[in-house]
Image (spheres, rainbow, N blue to C red):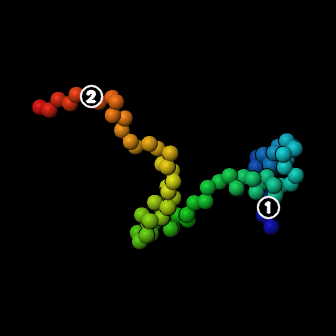
Amino acid sequence: MIEIHEPELEALIQDRMASGNFASVEDVVRSALEGLPIQPRKDELDEPRGGLVRVCALVRGLGDDVEFSRDRSFDRPVELF
């Protein structure tokens, strides 16, 4: 069982339920948690072994939409000193 002790947090949940988009407190919490990215535990990030692999896994796919090709139609003269 989970209890909420902060009145501000309880008020936020009640506001979300009053909007009509959520049928229960569980629906509000589920929606909030599903919107958060899953992050590794802090102690996992502090480990030296496998740390780079873990960091690369976290950012995998973030730059898939970046175009790295050069548009050759805008060549500029280069002055070498």
Gap between marks 2 and 1, in whole Å?
65 Å
* Residue under the point 80% across and 67% down: 1
> As shown in the figure, which amino acid type bears the numbered disc 2?
Arg
> As shown in the figure, which amino acid type bears the numbered disc 1?
Glu
Classify 10 Å Cα crowding around label 1: few (below 14), some (14-19), many (20 and above). Answer: few
Q: Nearer the viewer, residue 73 or 50?
A: 73
Which residue in the rendered view is the most extreme toward the bottom? 49
* Tag shown at residue 3: 1
* Residue under the point 48% across and 48% down: 63
* Tag shown at residue 26: none
Which x, y percent locates residue 50? Answer: 43, 70
Report if residue 51 is visible in the image.
yes
Which x, y percent locates residue 37? Answer: 61, 55
* Residue under the point 57% across and 60% down: 39
Element under disc 2:
loop
13 versus 52 height, above or below: above
Q: Is residue 16 left or right of residue 59?
A: right
63 versus 2 height, above or below: above
Choose mark 2 or mark 1, whichever is in front: 2
Location of residue 74 by image quarter: top left
Q: Is residue 14 left or right of residue 36?
A: right
* Tag shown at residue 76: 2
25 versus 44 height, above or below: above
